[in-house]
Amino acid sequence: MREDDLVVAIRALVDADAPARVRVGIGDDAAVWQPSRSHRSAITTDALIEDVHFKRAWASDREIGIRAMVANVSDLAAMGARPILATVALGFPSAFGNENVLELYRGMLEVARQARLCIVGGDLTRAPVVTIAITLVGEVRDSNLKLRRGARAGDAIVVTGPLGAARAGLDVLRESVKLEGALVEEALRAYRTPQARLAQGRWLGASANVHAMMDCSDGLSTDVARLCAASGTGALIDDVPIAACAAAAARALGVDAAGYALAGGEEYELIAAIAPRALTYLSARFHARFNRALLRVGEIRKDPEMLVRIGDRLETLAPAGFDHFA
Amino acid sequence: MREDDLVVAIRALVDADAPARVRVGIGDDAAVWQPSRSHRSAITTDALIEDVHFKRAWASDREIGIRAMVANVSDLAAMGARPILATVALGFPSAFGNENVLELYRGMLEVARQARLCIVGGDLTRAPVVTIAITLVGEVRDSNLKLRRGARAGDAIVVTGPLGAARAGLDVLRESVKLEGALVEEALRAYRTPQARLAQGRWLGASANVHAMMDCSDGLSTDVARLCAASGTGALIDDVPIAACAAAAARALGVDAAGYALAGGEEYELIAAIAPRALTYLSARFHARFNRALLRVGEIRKDPEMLVRIGDRLETLAPAGFDHFA
């Protein structure tokens, strides 16, 4: 059973109990409920486990804290929500000292301050490896809430930045690839200190022309397929924006650069499905607001197939991103 | 550094950022914030790690799910709050199959249904051992919110049930003690399928004569000391209510039964500090409502010493409950 199938089985157990106040349950980047008539709260949880999601040799404790918090902030960004508070359940072995714990917290707090959220509670425990489970609660206006479902045939698929840099960083750290100068820096920075697109997510959430949104944390090929499955559509990916260091890494490995960037992961650009007539206007305003491009990668299609254009051919897009149980 | 000291160091990092909307931050059973003017939400997180908090040989997967959810529900009960929703971050090794995962969920759902809360989201990941981090969000009226701080000199200290049964269950499972018949059942049931005192917590929360409350999950001696530290008081414990199986286990081990029950843990009775003039009335109403006794264990004292009466002598009460890093 793959990760997505186990989620479906759990959902079948759980959904029977969901009361009306729960507006979005298991299966999106975050769940949404209604604490009072005028409010929508969003909640998400994400765990990072040593030697599964990171190796301590690959990043400082502070950077591990940054990565753990960014993964959660990104899930709220993908809903168009604003984070308010976090709880942290932290497990660690006895060799992980108090100064290590505090450095991890300093990293989480750096991200928390930028996102203007507050760590309000937690749990400390022994564990065989460093285990960081963060839960974030945020707020979102009902009109700004974006889900994975909602994409329509003809929508343009956009991402908020070039892809593959974190994968290149991982390949450098694993010593599967050697890069030089600024490219190494770009790759390692993308892996160690990623950025969540929080302001961009809230901005995109405020537009009625954005029909669906999610983050790209398991790789574009896997995550576009999830967005399409939730929307009951397919997609054609025909223009993958590739980070310079990812292009160099693919070249060094002798693999197709677009394929390399499609199968990334642990990067936090947002994916959105946008009404095609609004694309030019939204892209211009996005650039003016954030000084970065909103990059068109393909389009949503009615036919539920997932396709990618390689040169002149259309091929089936296999979800090649991160599956935690593959 | 003990667990409580590390919490203090983390708090010093985190508290500087807490905005006014956060009413209770790190250091109580749950944190409390204000999503809108008329609402108070409470949030708590608690992780259970295989071979730290449980052994798979000691309980079924369903029972492990029950224990994990009860630990969290109890933290909200201790605030006088009502749980609404939960997220679950679950890590497990490849030998832990899908049916094991679903059984764990069935156990969590049993508790969730009783508590009328909904599991709305989660995260599944590989981990070296079974790792269950649950976060719960609840609601509480401002007037019903009970904290650890607030106990006053002269208050009666009460608990919602006899203590030590879960410890006896653990001792049976570890084969450090042999019990017979109904006593084994009582001990194993207390360890494997504990109950959170949710209705009792909300009922106590509604009384202005209850000045402070927390749960007893790390053992009475450790947790009363925490309540007193938060309240700036001391306490004298002079009457520890001992579960029948705990008394039998202490006898078999040749140790003092009160000391055995004081140093329990993983049991979820509530501890409350109650205005002394209200004790008789509240106890009678509690008994009428729940058909169980509200048990007086001692009193809050101005002098910040922690004392316990053993026969005719007063001894210093050492926190002998569970410290995750001791």
Image (tube, coloured by chain):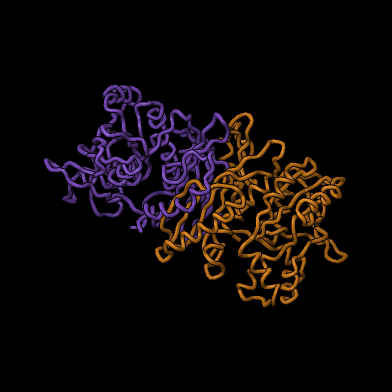
Chain colours: A purple, B orange
Q: Is residue B68 above or below residue B80?
A: below
Front residue of A93/B293: it is B293
Quadrant assignment, res B219: bottom right
Front residue of B8/A126: it is A126
Q: Can I make out residue A64 in this image?
A: yes
Q: Is residue B230 above or below residue A5?
A: above
Front residue of A187/B52: it is B52
Q: Residue at x 43, y 59 (%)?
A: B127
Residue A3: image location, x then y, percent:
37, 54
Q: Quadrant of the C terminus of chain A?
A: bottom left
Q: Residue at x 53, y 48 (%)?
A: A17
B123 left or right, relative to B30? left
Q: How many marks?
A: 0
Q: Can I make out residue A189 in this image?
A: no
Q: Is residue A120 above or below residue A284?
A: below
Residue B179: image location, x then y, percent:
69, 76
A201 left or right, relative to A90? left
Q: Residue at x 44, y 38 (%)?
A: A76
Residue A156: image location, x then y, percent:
27, 32
Toward the front, the furthest residue is A16
Q: Residue at x 57, y 52 (%)?
A: B46
Q: Quadrant of the N terminus of chain A?
A: bottom left
Quadrant assignment, res B35: top right
Toward the left, the furthest residue is A312
Q: Is residue B103 above or below residue A76?
A: below
Residue A86: image location, x then y, percent:
52, 41
